[in-house]
Image (cartoon, rainbow, N blue to C red):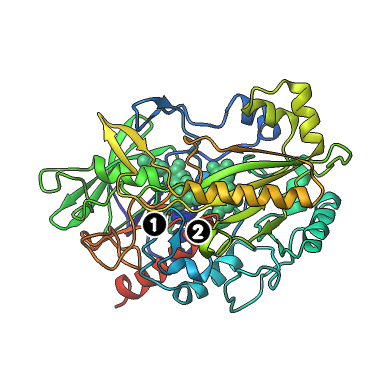
Amino acid sequence: MQAAADIVIIGSGMGGATLAAALAPSGRRIVIVERGARLADSPAARDEAAIFARGEFRPPEVWLDGAGVAFNPGNYYYAGGNSKFYGAVLARLRAEDFSPLHHLGGSTCGWPISYGELEPWYQATEALYQVRGCLGQDPSEPAHSGSYPFPPVPDEPAIAALRRRLVALDLHPASLPLGVDLARWLGRGATPWDAFPDTCGGKMDAETVALAQALRHPNVTLLEGAKALRLRAEGSRIAAVEVQRAGQIKRLTAPLIVLAAGAVNTAALLLGSADAAHPGGLANRSDQVGRNFMNHNLSAVLAINPLRANRSVYQKTLQLNDFYLTGGAGGTPLGNIQLLGKISGGILAADTPLPRPVANWIARHSVDFLAMSEDLPNPESRVTLKAGQIVLDWRRSNWQAHLALVARLKSVLRRAGYPIVLARAFDRRTPSHQCGTARMGADRGTSVVDGFCRSHDHRNLFICDASVLPTSAAVNPALTIAALALRAADHIRQTEFAA
Ligand SMILES: Cc1cc2nc3c(=O)[nH]c(=O)nc-3n(C[C@H](O)[C@H](O)[C@H](O)COP(=O)(O)OP(=O)(O)OC[C@H]3O[C@@H](n4cnc5c(N)ncnc54)[C@H](O)[C@@H]3O)c2cc1C
């Protein structure tokens, strides 16, 4: 079967949906191929046992790690992609992240574009996603050409008190930039939003914002439950996408193809599309597809004062970047600290061997942080395929910087009045901040796409998702992915739609 469009976009997550929203007003026929379905509301959507203990929203999918051990990844397939579950932190990279940086664990390469080039697109993305934040509190904050569209989500009383304690220690706690409609989220149930599925529109995610905006245009079609199986090249162009839907295989053709399946699946699709002319996979003359996989070094850090209950419901409103750029030995970067969504006894017990009464007690008294450090690009950290199955061989890097960040956070929290501080690293196999597998660069020999996300090898192929990030920085990636997608869409308008 043959279906024609002007643009086929594979994936409706942060990159794909944002690009679709930007190109929709052009009137071009856009088909979005999305492997997942729309998330329907259900009691499970606010049931922590269903989400965290039983993993009901996770895919029934098995990947292999570098040692060949099978695991079920926390990688979500729904319209809106992983953003349906995200913590809705919509933060910019720091200006310095775009330049080469020396870290405790090695050096990073820098980006082919500067912060200044991306800044207008950050601004536009914050407007699109209705970000709530406050400028001027964060010492590492890059220059903004405008203010946030909405004021920050308010601290709950326990967090307002924590903020005061951190200020008294001469630190600079800052409001997290968030895409959350608080009243709407809490109207559906008094839970945090971090890692909970958004079935009520309370989060400004790729589906509720960008996909919804794109689909208001009659020229945009969403094919739900449609899995792209492979791309077909003819000469130097991508001629078609083979898509499986409802047991049928369709061949979709379009002059422009956008791959936005997320860093792991985008690499898997390109590698799995190898043919006689491209034995190493499509867009892969550089041999960089699948390489440089990064995922952030993350730890949950729980600060406990047995005499102080934390009655917060959502908690996630504050960050600390005092150690971001220069907190480490020799003035090296350590990373970002931000609050997690409020941990409950059920969430804690689902992820640890703690007996439930102990988990309940800890959760009642803890303030819960996320320490996030940069994972550096390494060509041996990679996605490959083994008989069609995804192999994710993540080689964690810069671990000493992460340990130093956790140590500094623990020391701060003890001084802020929390005598017990517990830390636990996130599971290696949770690829929530996956990026880097089709990196952007000026040199076609060492990168997969150019500074506008266009494949060096196939002019009619764009990659618009987390794959293109040349470095992971130590910032939640979604806003940057969306800003790059808006910038790529503008480039497509100028170069492909002219005349
Ligand atoms: C629990 C959790 C919390 C997070 N919190 C934050 C946060 O607070 N802030 C932040 O910035 N980031 C956060 N992230 C990360 C953020 O969600 C991702 O960085 C972002 O969604 C990645 O965008 P993407 O476009 O690369 O991929 P995705 O958004 O994952 O989109 C990829 C899309 O492609 C589809 N797809 C995949 N394969 C195929 C195929 N073969 N055919 C068709 N469709 C396909 C998928 O179903 C999906 O819809 C979080 C992630 C998780 C899991």
Residue pictured at 40% horizontal, 67% vertical? 100
Quick one: which residue is furthest to the right in this view?
307
Instruction: Provide the secondary structure element on which disc 1 rests.
Output: strand
**Other-residue count near label 1 (Cα within 10 Å), few / some / many at <14 / 14–19 / ≥20:** many
Residue pictured at 55% horizontal, 45% vertical? 298
* Disc ID at residue 214: 2
State if disc 1 and disc 2 touch (CB < 8 Å).
yes
Tell me the quarter of the image containing the C terminus: bottom left
Residue 31, horizontal then vertical, whole percent? 39, 52
Quick one: which residue is furthest to the top in this view?
355
Of marks 2 and 1, which one's residue comes earlier in the chain?
1
Tell me the quarter of the image containing the N terminus: top left
Is residue 342 shown left or right of residue 60? right
Residue pictured at 53% horizontal, 65% vertical? 331
Identify the residue under disc 1: 30
Amino acid marked by disc 1 = Ile
Can residue 367 be seen here? yes
Amino acid marked by disc 2 = Ala
Q: Give the distance between the C-alpha atoms of the residues marked 2 and 1, in whole angstroms.
A: 9 Å
Q: Write down the quadrant of residue 264 in the picture.
A: top left
Quick one: which residue is furthest to the left in this view?
276
Quick one: which residue is furthest to the front in this view?
330
Pick whichever, 339 or 273, lies toward us.
Answer: 339
Q: Write down the quadrant of residue 269 in the picture.
A: top left
Pick whichever, 396 or 74, lies toward us.
Answer: 396
In this rendering, is residue 268 above or below 348?
below
Residue pictured at 25% horizontal, 28% vertical? 387
In this rendering, is residue 396 above or below 167?
above
Instruction: Provide the secondary structure element on which disc 2 rests.
Output: helix
